[in-house]
Amino acid sequence: MPTAKRIKVRVNPEKCQGHNRCKALSPELFELDEYGNSKEIGDGTVPPEFEDKAWLARANCPEFAVEIIED
């Protein structure tokens, strides 16, 4: 039986400019760092029920800072 693919989100700190659209759209997956930029919560693992929100956050980042890693 194949295992289900899991995804993780990652915010590239070199690209993030603090628009925080990802946090606004997916507060379950993102938090703010000490500079007001978004970062992934924990290790970035996305629970299956929030996968659509992860893709939405990625699509709405004007700096293309949100990355999705498929395991």
Image: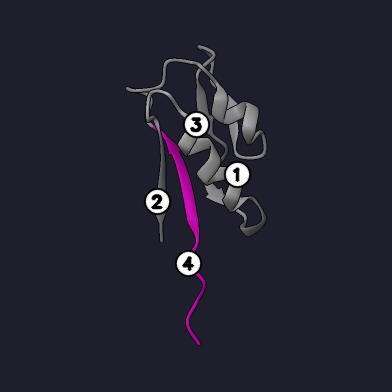
- What's the residue at 54%, 44% (across, down)? 54
Q: Earlier in the sequence, mark 3 or mark 1?
A: 1
- What's the residue at 59%, 50% (across, down)? 52
User: Mark 3 or 4, which is nearer the eye?
Assistant: 3
Q: Which residue is mark 4?
A: 5
Q: Earlier in the sequence, mark 2 or mark 4?
A: 4
The Cα–Cα distance between marks 2 and 4, rounded to whole angstroms, is 10 Å
Q: Is residue 68 above or below residue 36?
A: below
Query: What amino acid type should be assigned to the residue bearing mark 2?
Result: Ile
Marks 2/4 in contact by CB < 8 Å: the verdict is no
Q: Determine whether the residue tagged by mark 1 lies in a helix, strand or loop.
A: helix
Query: What amino acid type should be assigned to the residue bearing mark 3?
Result: Asn
Magenta region: which residues? 1-11
Query: What amino acid type should be assigned to the residue bearing mark 4?
Result: Lys
Say which quadrant the C terminus sits in: bottom left
- Considering depth in this image, is 19 or 71 the residue closer to the camera? 19
Q: Is residue 33 left or right of residue 12?
A: right
The Cα–Cα distance between marks 1 and 4, rounded to whole angstroms, is 16 Å
Q: Quadrant of residue 36?
A: top right
State the mark number for residue 69.
2
Q: Residue furthest left?
A: 14
Q: Residues within 10 Å of mark 2 (few under 14, many from 20)?
A: few
Q: Please tell me whether residue 15 belongs to the stretch shown in magenta.
A: no
Q: Which residue is mark 3?
A: 60
Q: Is residue 24 left or right of residue 14?
A: right
Query: What amino acid type should be assigned to the residue bearing mark 1?
Result: Lys
User: Mark 1 or 4, which is nearer the eye?
Assistant: 1
Q: Determine whether the residue tagged by mark 4 lies in a helix, strand or loop.
A: loop
Q: Which residue is mark 1?
A: 53
